[in-house]
Amino acid sequence: MQPKNHNHNALLTLLQLVDSFFPTGAFAHSFGLETYVQNGLVTDQPSCEELLRNALLEGIRNTDAVALALAYKSAQTYENAPDASIEQIADLDMRLTALKLPRESRNGSAHIGKQFLRNARHLVPHPALDAYEKRIRAKDCAGHHAIAFGLVTAAASIELPNALLGFLHAYVVGQVSAAVRLIPLGATEGQLTIHSLKPHLREIVEFAQNANLDDFVAFTHGLDIRSMQHERLYSRLFIS
């Protein structure tokens, strides 16, 4: 039986990992949202909510969420089968790189992931994290945030559903924070947007925790195009 404070420790670690104060640089990315706003396609709370809902259900659900869950499971088997586990992790990294078509989004995911991993390793030491960072330094892996997050939360004994919820919630909060600055969206409207997306986060968690490689797909052509257009905007507040 786990000590009584075990779940509290895991929860506190998760809260620390998803806090905006945790140094990842995620605040500098809008992942295409800035293009939607400048083109007049996202102008208020309902249109922002619609974009985020579609990005979650058509993109994050079958890409980052699946990658996180599979990386988490690879970390759990690492100590018994380190060679096989790191190859699985490297394969996930390669697949996620291929699915992130826009250069800015792909680079943003890797930049955030490397920063996250570099700092999280000080809090949660684990050989799987060391092996992944070694592959990143050798340029064999990009270092995507979802994969690093899955590895770190497994190492911290955070339950997979909670790890997925934390990652998804942080994504939504980050996008809404960007929307508050870009549209601009009011603070109350931003909180309403976050609240309205909770059922979709739960749905994604139910799907992703039982997903396999066959579920690893993406279908976000509109978002991909807007993300590609972002680097050619006349003025930009965000890196992506």
Image (cartoon, grey):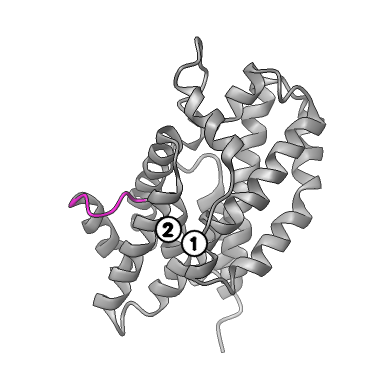
- Magenta stretch, main secondary structure, is loop
Point out the residue furthest to the bottom here: 1
Q: Magenta stretch: residue 88 in it? A: no
Badge 1 is on which residue?
68
Identify the residue at image location x=25%, y=52%: 136
Relative to 194, 7 lies left or right: left
Q: Is residue 125 visible?
A: no
- Looking at the image, is 152 positioned above or below residue 108? below
- The tag earlier along the polypeptide, 2 or 1, is 1
Dot 1: element: helix
Identify the residue at image location x=61%, y=79%: 4
Point out the residue furthest to the top here: 234
Identify the residue at image location x=61%, y=29%: 33
Badge 2 is on which residue?
147
- Looking at the image, is 93 positioned above or below residue 220? below
How many angstroms separate mark 2 from mark 1 (CA)? 5 Å
- Looking at the image, is 128 positioned above or below residue 106? below
Q: Position of residue 7 (x, y in %)?
A: 60, 72
Q: Amino acid at mark 1?
A: Leu
Span highlighted in magenta in the image: 138-143
Decide: few, some or many residues near mark 1? Use Cα within 10 Å; few <14, some 14-19, many ≥20.
Answer: many
Q: Position of residue 47 (x, y in %)?
A: 77, 31
Mark 2 near mark 1, Cβ–Cβ under 8 Å? yes
